Amino acid sequence: MTVMVEPTHLPKLYRELADWWPVLSAPEEYAEEAEFYRQTILSHCGYPPKTMLELGCGGGNNASHLKAHFELTLVDLSPGMLAVSRKLNPECEHLQGDMRDIRLGRQFDVVFIHDAIAYMTTESDLRRAIETAYCHCKPGGVALFAPDQVRETFKTSTDHGGHDGEGCSLRYLEWAWDPDPEDTRYLVYMVYLLRRGDNAVRCVEDRHELGLFSHDDWMRLIREAGFQPKSLPFGHSLLEPGSTFVFLGLNW
Ligand SMILES: C[S@@+](CC[C@H](N)C(=O)[O-])C[C@H]1O[C@@H](n2cnc3c(N)ncnc32)[C@H](O)[C@@H]1O
């Protein structure tokens, strides 16, 4: 029997609110970016890639698009988020683990870390996550890291959204700012309005502490892990061109 350990330091969204994830963030919203990641991977892998390890898969929204093209192994720290992803992606292998220290003893053509990489808030944690990617990446393969923000283009921002599901609806307000430009963290405060079928509405606030690193720091850490580093502007119709980057580690 596998015992799932509930990490207590994660935001509420990934613990007691994990089953609300599908009405916060819907799989359809990820189609365009998943295709960008797939094309980027295809043009940077030394051979046609088949297997992919995703670290910090969350509710499996990217995976729901990528699984048509790759054999996926999905890892997350949160048992609740893994349960959400398992429901959406029952055909994929799911494992609980921490991207800073998990060692599966096997290698993949591609290692992908999407926005979960933002939960690495110190250089030491980011270094460990990139080293994990390197250990699991086959020679000739590629790792892709997609942070939400890099230091140079960070701006204070607000956002809102949410969806209606079967018998439950959610709306959120999100506010991001950087309290100390000298360190490697920024904060996102979120307020969720949660409505069940009976129209009772509950309001929950949450705090996400996220990592903020410069472009040069990213490139250096990827190189120091053993990869050849490369960065590309992230192309998405909803984002200003050049507003953020994806980073690649080429294992060749
Ligand atoms: C925004 S969600 C990821 C959503 C995902 N991109 C998707 O496509 O559905 C961030 C995830 O990072 C996970 N996470 C945070 N720290 C982690 C760590 N150290 N190791 C593994 N997963 C982690 C959280 O549990 C959460 O599920």
Image (tube, rainbow, N blue to C red):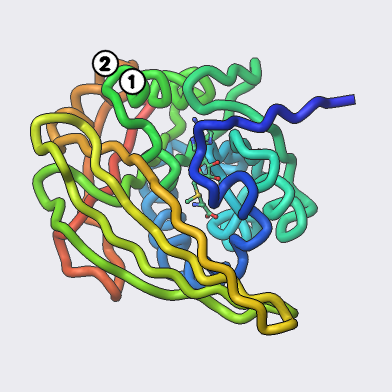
For disc 1, the marked residue is 127
Residue 224: which numbered mark, if any? 2
Q: Are marks 2 and 1 in contact (CB under 8 Å)?
A: yes
> Would residue 9 appear left or right of 212 to someone viewing this image?
right
Q: Amino acid at mark 2?
A: Glu
Please name whichever residue, 194 or 237, is drawn nearer the observer in this view of the structure: 194
Q: Which residue appears at 19% of the width and 23% of the height?
A: 220
- Under mark 1, the amino acid is Arg
The foreground one among 240 and 140 is 240
Residue 216: x %, y % from top left:
13, 31
Horizontal and vertical percent for residue 43? Answer: 37, 49
Question: Who's the residue at 60% across and 17% down the image?
Answer: 103
SS assignment at label 2:
helix
Dot 1 beta carbon under 8 Å from ligand 1: no
| Residue density around tag 2, few if under 14, some if 14–19, many if 20 or more, within 10 Å | some
Q: Nearer the viewer, residue 130 or 207?
A: 207
Q: Seen in the image, is 208 located left or right of residue 168?
A: left
Above or below: residue 27 compared with residue 59: below
- SS of the residue at dot 1? helix
